[in-house]
Image (cartoon, helix red, strand yellow):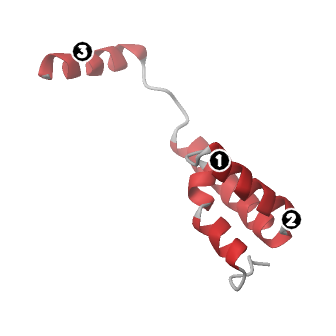
Amino acid sequence: MSPDSGKPACNQAMQRLHQYVDRELTEAEMTEVQLHLEDCPPCEKHFTVHASMKRLVHSKACPENAPQELLDRILSNLRTSR
């Protein structure tokens, strides 16, 4: 099942999907997309799959945080290079 590309609301929601998942939209835009997802099962399913995939990639690609010593050196080098 895929979003109905013939509906303007679906098109608009799908164009904003990446920004919605990353929480890069304004509060009003987030609400608009959320309301659409609540009323449109095909778009909601597409969103759920996309969000799950993003979480999976993040968990596999970023399993560890950088050691604090490395972060400190990088920040120090950035400060001195200015």
Q: Secondary structure at mark 3?
A: helix
Between disc 1 and disc 2, the foreground one is 2
Q: Secondary structure at mark 1?
A: helix
Q: Quadrant of residue 66?
A: top left
The image's mark for residue 6 is none
Q: Secondary structure at mark 2?
A: helix
Q: Amino acid at mark 3?
A: Ser
**For the residues marked 1 and 2, what is the alpha-carbon distance in whole angstroms?**
24 Å
Give the residue at mark 1.
55
Q: Is residue 9 above or below residue 7?
A: above
Give the residue at mark 3.
76
Residue 44 horizontal/vertical position (percent) = 79, 63
Between disc 3 and disc 2, the foreground one is 2
Q: Is residue 21 above or below residue 79?
A: below
* Residue for point 79% across, 65% down: 45
* Residue for point 68% across, 78% down: 8
Give the residue at mark 2.
39
**For the residues marked 3 and 2, what is the alpha-carbon distance in whole angstroms?**
50 Å
Q: Quadrant of the C terminus?
A: top left
* Residue for point 58% across, 50% down: 57
